[in-house]
Amino acid sequence: MSFVLKSPQEVMQDIALRAKAKRLEQNLTQQGLSVRSGVSLGTIKRFERFGEISLKSLIDIALALGCMEDFEELFKVNQTPTSLFGISNNDKPRKRGTIK
């Protein structure tokens, strides 16, 4: 399933549904996830219902559900080789943007 053609709200809802499914797969109640993750029960309820959550709470929930590796691909820098010999040493990471 791709997030490309979805609104931000739809993406949030999809993530919330996946987290809920993962919680239920592990036979956890919302209260149980709250205790494991340190995230308040109200925050978990709001997240599962509306998809709204802070990044810190989302990471805490992912850690409790064993899904931290899912964050590895988020904002991953593409390091594609520019030649057959690998990545060029001249390609330094940008420190700031130029477009206003």
Image (cartoon, rainbow, N blue to C red):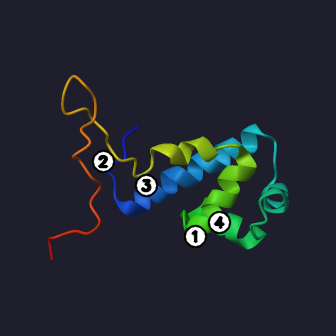
Give the quadrant of the C terminus: bottom left
Q: Residue at x 33, y 53 (%)?
A: 6
Tell me the residue at 59%/42% (across/down). Answer: 69
Number of numbered discs on residues: 4
The answer to whether residue 27 is left or right of residue 45 is: right
Q: Nearest to the eye among marks 3 and 1: give it.
A: 1
N-terminal of the two: label 3 or label 4? 3
Tell me the kind of residue under disc 3: Val
> Can you say whether 99 is above or below 48 in the image?
below
**How would you rate the neighbour count of disc 1 (Cα within 10 Å): few for under 14, some for 14-19, many for 20 or more?**
few
User: In x, y percent, where is residue 15?
Assistant: 53, 52
Classify residue 87 by image quadrant: top left
Secondary structure at numbered mark 2: loop
Residue that label 3 marks: 11
Tell me residue 83's x, y (percent): 18, 28
Q: Which residue is mark 1?
A: 54
